[in-house]
Image (cartoon, rainbow, N blue to C red):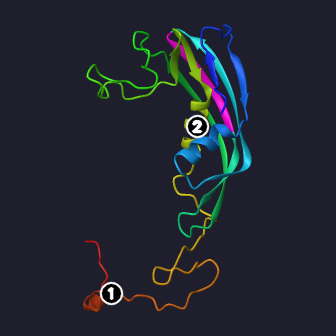
Amino acid sequence: MQKYRISINDLPPDGKEFDLDDQAIWQTPMREFEMDCRISSPLSAHISVLPAEGGCLVRGELRGQVVLPCNRCAEDAVTDIRSSFEEFEELPDEEDPDAGLNAHAGNGAPDPAAETESRIIYERNTPMLDLAAVCWEEFMLALPVNPLCKTDCKGLCAQCGANLNNDDCGCIPDEGDPRLAVLRGLTLHKT
């Protein structure tokens, strides 16, 4: 995959815009993390980077469509990705050349004070913004927590595993613990 790192120092004062539509930006990490996700309509990002003191302002839009497994029935759930974002990327400490990638304390252990990873790294003492990392992170944030094939998805039968969207499975519903049958008709009243 092509590297999409841009030099913060080479940006004009009024900023610069970038259009990214290389599907490898998203497909490579999907394979790496073994995600059950496939691109059904090409993903694209439009990113504007404005240099500022101590970092840069990153604004953009992410568009496309992916297919995820439905959270209830495991069938395909087509998901539109439409996301706008704006955030400030702070320059990491220049004395630590790995500060943008791995924030570590002096003993090699992760530094708890450096909880966030910067998407700006130093290459040959030049701060570089990784646009592919911006695209991947914003894509992950745009994915739904609970993807559904349709809003009224009935899911799978807990007994036989049949997809209840297609037809009733014929299983007898579980009545629960017979010892608690006397409590089924109980109603509570507020006082």
Q: Earlier in the sequence, mark 2 or mark 1?
A: 2
Q: Nearer the viewer, residue 149 or 123?
A: 123
Residue 1 drawn above or below residue 178: above
Which image quarter is the C terminus in? Answer: bottom left
Report the predominant secondary structure element of the magenta stretch: strand
Which type of secondary structure does the marked residue at label 2 adopt? helix
Residue at mark 2 to residue at mark 1: CA–CA distance:
50 Å
- x and y, in percent, of residue 26 in the image: 63, 41
Q: Is residue 19 left or right of residue 6?
A: right
The stretch in magenta equals: 54-62
Residue at 56% x, 87% y: name it.
Answer: 169
Which image quarter is the N terminus in? Answer: top right
- Quadrant of the rendered structure where residue 8 is? top right
Which type of secondary structure does the marked residue at label 1 adopt? loop
User: Label 1 amino acid?
Assistant: Arg
- x and y, in percent, of residue 130 in the image: 58, 25
- x and y, in percent, of residue 187 in the image: 32, 82
Asked if residue 6 lies in the magenta stretch, the reply is no
Mark 2 Cα-neighbour bin, 10 Å: few <14, some 14–19, many ≥20 = some
Residue at 63% x, 18% y: name it.
Answer: 6
Q: Nearer the viewer, residue 50 or 182?
A: 50
Q: Is residue 160 left or right of residue 60?
A: left
User: Label 2 amino acid?
Assistant: Trp
The residue that disc 1 covers is 184
Residue 93 drawn above or below residue 135: above
The residue that disc 2 covers is 136
Mark 1 Cα-neighbour bin, 10 Å: few <14, some 14–19, many ≥20 = few
